[in-house]
Image (cartoon, helix red, strand yellow):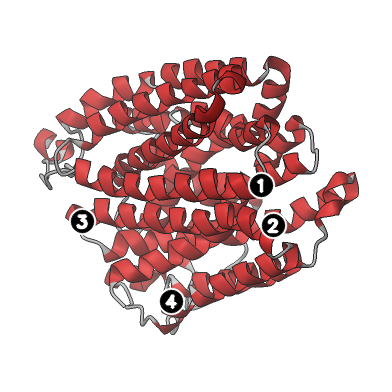
Amino acid sequence: MGAMGLLLSLYLAQGLPGGFLTQALPAILREYHVPLGWIGFSGILLAPAAVKFLWAPLVDRHFSPRLGLARSWILPTQLLAIALLFGVSAFHPEQLQTPRGLALFFSLLLVLVFAGATQDIASDGLNVRLLAPAHRQWGNAVQVVGSRLGQIIGGGGVLLGLGLFGWQTVFVLMAVGVALNTLPILCYREPLWPHLRSSIPHEKSATPSLRERWQQIQQRYGYFWQAGEMRQWLLVLLLCRMGDGLSAGMVKPMMVDMGYRLNTIGVMAGVIGSIASLLGALLGALLLRRLEAGKALLGLMLLQSLVTLAYAGLWAFHARMGKWADFWVFGINALEHLLTAMALIPLLTLAMHYTRKGKEGSDYTFQVCMMASLAGLAHVVSGWMAEALGFSLHFIACTVIGLVMLWPIVVWLPRWQQGGATRLNAARGVLFQEESQEQG
């Protein structure tokens, strides 16, 4: 299997439980009459994805030479995910209506997200190491395609399957799906990357204290806040997805409150929306052949923010739309998925270009965590915000916040275009000179 096929299988396996958490879970919770506030709070389950940079250096540094750097972490985390999905299959969904049942269910999902976050660190590092810089937009396209395919199955597929087969069968099938997507990495013979030979531990060292670990983290990631351009880029990562974080978790509960059944949401919003994401990933990669990555990011994030405003209109006028209601509800949802996937391609491609050799996995992971951190916090408060404002005002507020959060991109963009460090133009493969060499 080629590099792209291998990466596709990894991100597909990762997308199965991820799709359930982000696409299916909000609708399922609303179906069982869980308040919007607690549906939004379920975003706390994504916390490991926001702080995985804390253990990313361990994934970069410690591994078995026999298995390989990526396989040493991907194989055990995949096996853990399979076991946890079998555990979820034994859960009775009626228990979601009780605080104890909800706490137990969330606990299982939290460990599942932790396993997926660790697998993601290793997969992202492998992605960066396998692909030449000029081809990274295609690697990111494969990442988005694999994740979205997983979301089609784990999100829309689960919602549809719950009505056809029942809870236990659906999650057993999901576990089998993760197992099948583990086979390619199980058969892969990973090379011993030359610049990582010295990272192999030959002897045990003393366990560092918490203070020493914090100093190590500062040393490891200080690269991102020591220079002006990097600080601006860090601000872009932190703020660019705030509007999306506030809005995304409330779309499916809004559909439930509109009267749509879970199987309808699964097919129309989950499957069609995720297919739109696949198309968006392809279009995003093709766009970077024509347009510089920074400009593409700004334009697509602007369009994505504006589409969020349409959800406010859907809630306000849904009852008056008659036979066109389904067209507008699911059409706007598909358009949002398409634009979100398109925007992720330049964003992730730029993140790859800001990684350092030998630290690809942890540097890339740190940037993805920064994207997820404030967006995740926004998701946590989104339910209470929607309860307080109502769906229409909530989505209007999300749009305004999303537009304001584009300002860091406007400030950062000239620095990226002028060059400051070695940069690769993602659209044309043009390598800039390093500023430090010019000053020397």
Which residue was labeled with disc 1?
Answer: 262
Crowding at label 3, few (<14), some or many (≥20) Cα neighbours within 10 Å? some
- Mark closest to the chain's N terminus, 2 or 1: 2
**Residue 52 coordinates in the image, percent (x, y):** 55, 51
Q: Secondary structure at mark 4?
A: helix
Mark 4 or 2, which is nearer the eye?
2
Using the numbered discs, state the Cα–Cα distance from disc 3 to disc 4 in whole angstroms. 21 Å
Q: Are marks 2 and 1 in contact (CB under 8 Å)?
A: yes
- The three-letter amino acid code for the residue at tag 3 is His
- The three-letter amino acid code for the residue at tag 2 is Gly
Mark 4 or 1, which is nearer the eye?
1
- The three-letter amino acid code for the residue at tag 1 is Leu
**Residue 326 coordinates in the image, percent (x, y):** 53, 34
- Residue at (49% x, 51% y) in the render: 271
As rendered, which of 22 and 107 lies closer to the eye?
22
Using the numbered discs, state the Cα–Cα distance from disc 3 to disc 1 in whole angstroms. 39 Å
Q: Are marks 4 and 1 in contact (CB under 8 Å)?
A: no
Which residue was labeled with disc 3?
Answer: 135
Q: Quadrant of the N terminus?
A: bottom left
Q: Quadrant of the C terminus?
A: top left
Q: Secondary structure at mark 3?
A: helix
Q: Secondary structure at mark 1?
A: helix
- The three-letter amino acid code for the residue at tag 4 is Ile
Which residue was labeled with disc 2?
Answer: 163
Crowding at label 2, few (<14), some or many (≥20) Cα neighbours within 10 Å? few
Mark 3 or 1, which is nearer the eye?
1
- Mark closest to the chain's N terminus, 3 or 4: 3
Crowding at label 4, few (<14), some or many (≥20) Cα neighbours within 10 Å? some
Q: Is residue 395 visible?
A: no
